[in-house]
Amino acid sequence: MSVLLAKPNPPWSHLGYEVFSISSNSMDLPEMAVSKKNPAVLLVHGFGASTDHWRYNIPVLAKTHEVHAIDLLGFGRSEKPGELDYGGELWKEQIVAYVKERIKKPTVIVGNSLGGYAALAAAAALENESAGVVLLNAAGYFSDEKLSSDPKKFSSKIRKIIGAGLSRDLLVRWMIYPLIQRLIFENLRRPNVIRSTLKQVYIDSTNVDDYLIESIRRPSLDPGAFQVFQKVFQARGLKGKPIDQLFQDLKAPLLLLWGDSDPWLRDPKAKQEKFRLYAQKASLDIKEVFLNAGHCPHDEVPDLVNTEMLHWLQSN
């Protein structure tokens, strides 16, 4: 069961599309001692997740800070228009607009996975309006890395599997490839598949409960959900600046929280080392913490994550 303790905000849109967000206020937790001097905190979910994924973090952070959480366009309860070019640039601009138009004060942006990249990009763009960045197993690439492989390689593999009779790119692109995407999408949104996937990326699966499963399944039923999946599936990377360039632009302190047993990182130690190296090269005020958790430490070990974030927020 969720302990979110936050309420939906009044309607707000970005690029003409409705964006869902929630925030805490002093009426939700009578014991709150929120100071106007403290920065706001904005929580940004990862791929396939939503504001619901911060269920165990908002009540704790809200005792001392104004807390917001937002559903990125294409996810959660936000609109899922098929015509948008989904990626880091879109979500960066959405977060920047939300901070400027709705929060209107210096903000610490917290992001997990894909949301970590968007949080970092937004914080760099906000310059002095950013009060800090917290990255939880953030996605992204560096200047010395290539983006994901050319989709044509995938098409080539399909042709070899189904035979020489389907050798034309047009047939694969417009008939076979979309069919495979649809089959993958339908399979991925089955509750038992969602549960199984989460149990692979959570080291301790205690919090992989019915509430979490439904919070991921429900948005997949919305109009446009499959089109969003297609766009993200076909995209080559996050369509934004590499992380090392974003570090150079960042003017705020940085907290790196790693679920140290993340099975979705191909080489976790190498990735962590790159984050550390380039943050140091950019002369950032950086703190790094390793936790015994998987890809989503904020939901798997929320007590540890909350403690580290609060300590860091107080020290900064």
Image: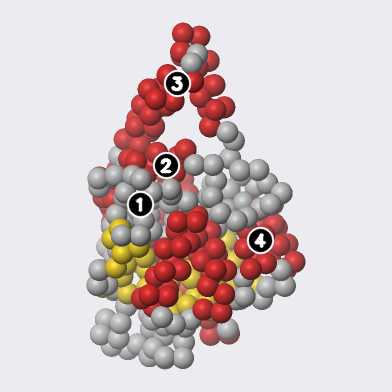
Q: Earlier in the sequence, mark 1 or mark 3?
A: 1
**Mark-to-mark CA distance, 1 and 2:** 10 Å
**Mark-to-mark CA distance, 4 and 1:** 26 Å
Query: Which residue is tagged 1?
Result: 74
Viewer-nearest of discs 3 and 4 = 3
Identify which amino acid the numbered label 4 is placed on. Answer: Gln
Badge 1 vs badge 2, beta-carbon distance below 8 Å: yes
Identify which amino acid the numbered label 3 is placed on. Answer: Leu
Please tell me in which quadrant of the rendered image residue 156 appears. top right
Instruction: Where is residue 160? Give x, y as percent.
Output: 53, 15
Disc 1 packing (10 Å; few <14; some 14–19; many ≥20): many
Instruction: Where is residue 134? Give x, y as percent.
Output: 54, 69
Q: Earlier in the sequence, mark 4 or mark 1?
A: 1
Identify which amino acid the numbered label 1 is placed on. Answer: Gly
Which residue occupies the extreme top position in the image? 165
Query: Which residue is tagged 3?
Result: 170
Badge 1 vs badge 3, beta-carbon distance below 8 Å: no
Q: Earlier in the sequence, mark 3 or mark 4?
A: 3
Please, is residue 205 above or below residue 34 in the view?
A: above
**Mark-to-mark CA distance, 3 and 4:** 37 Å
Q: Earlier in the sequence, mark 2 or mark 4?
A: 2
Query: Which residue is tagged 2?
Result: 231
Query: Which residue is tagged 4?
Result: 245
Front-most of residues 288 and 66: 66
Disc 3 packing (10 Å; few <14; some 14–19; many ≥20): few
Instruction: Where is residue 103? Give x, y as percent.
Output: 39, 78
| Left or right, residue 209 beside residue 125 | left
Tell me which residue sits at (31%, 64%) in the image: 13
Disc 4 packing (10 Å; few <14; some 14–19; many ≥20): some
Q: Earlier in the sequence, mark 2 or mark 3?
A: 3
SS at mark 3 in the image: helix
Instruction: Where is residue 112? Give x, y as percent.
Output: 48, 60
